[in-house]
Image (tube, rainbow, N blue to C red):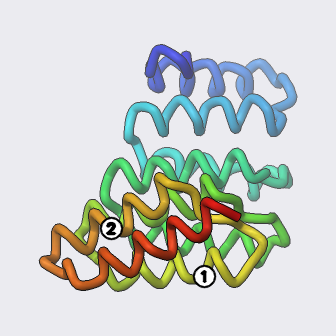
Amino acid sequence: CETTSQWQRALVLLAAMDLAILELDIISCTSAISACEKGSSWQITLALLHAMVQAMLEPDAISYNSTIAACEKSAEWQMAIVLLAAMELTALESDTISYHSAISACERCVNWQKALELLAAMGKIVVKPNTASYSSAISACEKCAQWQSAPALLAVMGESLLK
């Protein structure tokens, strides 16, 4: 269901597991979250993430990354940032995917300041920004007519990628 973006079918299967008294696990819940992410259903991915916690299942980085990516696709930058912070509160390590999705959500909402903040935060922790992260931040600046930031970002990107 995940690869064909049939998120509704994934939710039906997940509900059927619950009704059949089959044990829900992290893999089945994360698969449903990922399927919903592909369908850009950020509210449902968030509800599933919450349901995992209520069921005493500990969401993993993949669960969070898929939910953040769903927020990105729906331009829900504030929720993407809340989820990124929640990962750190639960002692899960955010990664390049986590930050890139949050930066892209900011780009979609033309929030160039927050995109740059997230990019800078990546440099302060162990997560190394990649080309896509820099491109999204540069694009956010471009969409807001903040072209002055682009040359500096390109220079930092070049230095970072050469290391």
> Looking at the picture, does residue 43 appear above or below residue 77?
above
Depth check, mark 1 against mark 2: the one in front is 2
Residue 115 in view, yes or no: yes
Q: Position of residue 162 (x, y in %)?
A: 64, 61
Q: Give residue 94's quadrant in the image.
A: bottom right
Residue 101 in view, yes or no: no
User: Horizontal placement of 32 versus 109: left or right?
Assistant: right
Lower sequence index among marks 1 and 2: 1
Q: Position of residue 31 (x, y in %)?
A: 66, 30
Q: Which residue is mark 2?
A: 138
- Residue at position x 40%, y 42% in the image: 41
Q: Residues within 10 Å of mark 1 (few under 14, many from 20)?
A: some
- Residue at position x 71%, y 24% in the image: 19
Q: Residues within 10 Å of mark 2 (few under 14, many from 20)?
A: many
Q: SS class of the residue under badge 2?
A: helix
Image quarter in which the N terminus is found? top right
> Looking at the picture, does residue 148 appear above or below residue 100?
below
CA separation in Å, label 1 and label 2: 16 Å
- Residue at position x 79%, y 65% in the image: 93
> Looking at the picture, does residue 120 appear above or below residue 71?
below
Count of numbered badges drawn on the protein: 2
Q: Position of residue 15 (x, y in %)?
A: 63, 27
Q: Are marks 1 and 2 in contact (CB under 8 Å)?
A: no
> Looking at the picture, does residue 146 appear above or below residue 66?
below
Image quarter in which the C terminus is found? bottom right
Q: SS class of the residue under badge 1?
A: helix
Residue type highlighted by circle 1: Ala
Is 68 in front, or is 113? 113
Q: Which residue is mark 1?
A: 121
Is 128 in front, or is 101? 128
Residue type highlighted by circle 2: Ile
Q: Give residue 160's quadrant in the image.
A: bottom right
